[in-house]
């Protein structure tokens, strides 16, 4: 009977240890991705000061998008892929602002709630990369919706909706 208690105690201790390890792996991962992206962008000398970092999980690839200033003190977005692909850098002035996209979103969709608006990269039908603003929101039919606007001019590109359960 005592042996069963010891074995049960060891199993419970292992389960707690694995649970804590799993929790730490999940919660630490986003910061590590951003830190790695910042280090890569700085080592390739495309950004000197990072003001903001967001993760973008597109339909084909995932990116960490950094916003900051380059060596010329120009405000830039740097799209750092999660693989060995080259970085994509765009000056902020080459595109529209998130606020412009928010205004267009409100006019075109009248969302119940805007969750976030962030820059990203998608792949079009010709298999070319397209810089976009991804607006995530709850629409009037209570669906979780992703609307994409071209980064360069703010024109609507496409949207996808998911019915909430």
Image (cartoon, rainbow, N blue to C red):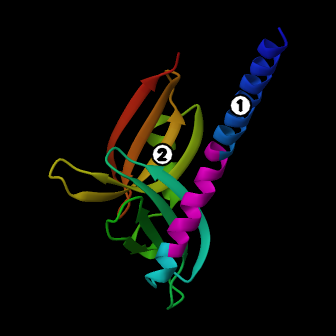
User: What crowding class fits label 1: few (fewer than 14 Cα within 10 Å), some (14-19), or many (20 or more)?
Assistant: few
The residue at 67%/35% (across/down) is: 18
Q: Residue furthest left?
A: 126
Residue 12 on image: x %, y %: 75, 24
Q: Earlier in the sequence, mark 2 or mark 1?
A: 1
Which residue corresponds to mark 2? 135
User: As rendered, which of 157 and 160 lies closer to the eye?
Assistant: 160
Residue 146 on image: x %, y %: 43, 38
Residue 89 on image: x %, y %: 39, 74
Q: Quadrant of the N terminus?
A: top right
User: What crowding class fits label 2: few (fewer than 14 Cα within 10 Å), some (14-19), or many (20 or more)?
Assistant: many
The region drawn magenta spans: 25-39
Find numbered disc 1 in the image and state the secondary structure of the residue it sits on: helix
Which residue corresponds to mark 1? 14
Task: Name the dominant secondary structure of the magenta segment.
Answer: helix
Horizontal placement of 117 versus 151: left or right?
A: right
Spatial separation of the CA atoms under disc 2 and disc 1? 42 Å
Q: Residue furthest bottom?
A: 72
| Mark 2 in CB contact with mark 1 (< 8 angstroms) | no
Would residue 31 be counted in the magenta stretch?
Answer: yes
User: As rendered, which of 110 and 97 lies closer to the eye?
Assistant: 97
Find numbered disc 2 in the image and state the secondary structure of the residue it sits on: strand
Q: Residue furthest right?
A: 2
Depicted 12 relative to depicted 156: above or below: above
């Amino acid at each position: 009977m005592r042996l069963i208690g010891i074995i049960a105690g060891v199993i419970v201790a292992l389960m707690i240890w694995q649970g804590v390890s799993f929790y730490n792996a999940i919660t630490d991962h986003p910061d590590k991705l951003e830190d790695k992206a910042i280090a890569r962008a700085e080592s390739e000398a495309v950004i000197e000061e990072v003001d903001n970092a967001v993760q973008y999980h597109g339909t084909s690839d995932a990116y960490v998008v950094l916003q900051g200033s380059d060596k010329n003190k120009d405000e830039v977005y740097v799209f750092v892929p999660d693989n060995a692909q080259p970085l994509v850098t765009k000056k902020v002035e080459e595109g529209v602002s998130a606020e412009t996209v928010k205004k267009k979103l409100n006019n075109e969709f009248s969302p119940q709630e805007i969750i976030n608006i962030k820059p990203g990269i998608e792949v079009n039908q010709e298999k070319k990369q397209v810089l976009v603003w991804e607006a995530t929101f709850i629409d009037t039919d209570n669906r979780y919706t992703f609307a994409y606007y071209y980064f360069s001019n703010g024109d609507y590109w496409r949207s996808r909706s998911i019915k909430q359960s």
